[in-house]
Amino acid sequence: MRVIRRYLSAEITTATLLVFAALLMLFAFLDLIRELAELDKGSYRLPHIMAYVLLSVPGHAYELFPIAALIGTLFALAQLVANSEYTVMRVSGVSIPRMALTLVEVGLLFSVLSFVTGEFLAPPAEQAAQQLRAKAITGVIAQEFRSGLWVKDERHFVNITQVMPDSVLQGVKIYEFDAEHRLRRISLARRGEYVSDNLWRLRDVVQTDFADRKTTVSRIEQADWRSVLDPRLLSVLLVVPEQMSAWNLYFYMQHLRENNQQTSRHEIAFWNKLIYPFAVLVMMVLALPFAYYQRRVGGVGAKVFAGIMLGIAFAMLGRLFTYLGLLRDWPPFWSAILPTLMFLSLAMGMMWWGERR
């Protein structure tokens, strides 16, 4: 019995790793093709593109763990069925619950790898990739702190307290320096609205000018500000909740609550970070009922195709429930866990039906 378990574990692990590697190479190739369209923009050269593609790999790896586990397990089990090895295992006394337990044991390893990748590797790598790309193309250097987003735009240092979903800026501070790196002007604006062609309209502006040992303070209802920043670049520079680690999300939510700000999106992202690794286990268990079908139902290719469709459905369902949770103000925990529970229920139902046949 132990030999059969080891054989089953080895087959599933090997197939999952091969599928995982193939998917990673595919996504890296697609990233490379997309980024080549930006070649020679600013100082964006081929070494920058290669570095960007490599830094994007951990993020793709984190997203692909459940899908790779599903397709790899489906492929391995379909091969066992095609070679009549599955029938031999059942005749030898290996029950379906025993097989499911073996899948869970293998899945735990991939779940731990998924959590480590999503918590420690993907967030800093993704942030480094976006900053490298933005700096090479636009020359903008940016870093996000608790005080907001800090951006270096030529001789200007810009601090933005908050970027609203409609790209309206809240709490804009612009520190302008001259050619000799002396502070020339500080502009404080309550809000900023994007007009067009890198032009922003600042509202309720307080300007402090420093010249010849004289300081002048003036209040302006609105002022135009031209910057390399635009809504698209801001969306790249800002670290979105989905790309943050669970640890950082927890402390950032505390900061938002202390400042009476909305935390719904961050809470859903936090629970997704904790629950997503368990999706690997669910996907592997979901693959098991497909072994019940006879060859006439479909060969290895058909079952792998079914796995791809299930993986896409899982990804789409996860995004759907995230958006619905934000729109309908659902409890963040349930918004995050419902897709996994639905697929787990599907797996349990199929296993129960297969046992009754």
Image (cartoon, rainbow, N blue to C red):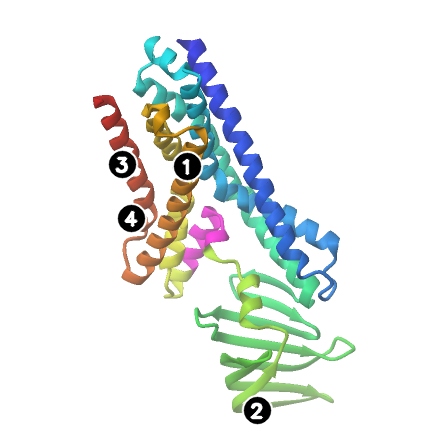
The answer to whether mark 4 and mark 1 are in CB contact below 8 A is: no
The tag earlier along the polypeptide, 2 or 3, is 2
117 relative to 209, above or below: above
Determine crowd level at label 3: few under 14, some 14-19, many 20+ residues with C-alpha closer than 10 A: some
Q: CA distance from mark 1 to mark 3?
A: 17 Å
Image quarter (top left, top right, bottom left or bottom right) of the C terminus: top left
The tag earlier along the polypeptide, 2 or 1, is 2
Residue that numbered label 4 is attached to: 334
Q: SS at mark 2?
A: strand
Q: Is residue 262 left or right of residue 55?
A: left
Q: Which mark is residue 345?
A: 3
Which residues lie in the magenta part?
A: 242-255
Determine crowd level at label 4: few under 14, some 14-19, many 20+ residues with C-alpha closer than 10 A: some
Give the total number of marks visible in the rendering.
4
Tag 3: amino acid: Ser
Tag 1: amino acid: Gly
Q: Is residue 42 magenta?
A: no
Q: Which mark is residue 307?
A: 1
Q: Residue at x 46, y 55 (%)?
A: 241
The tag earlier along the polypeptide, 1 or 3, is 1
| Closest to the observer, 143 or 60 | 60
Q: Specify whether residue 131 is in view.
A: yes
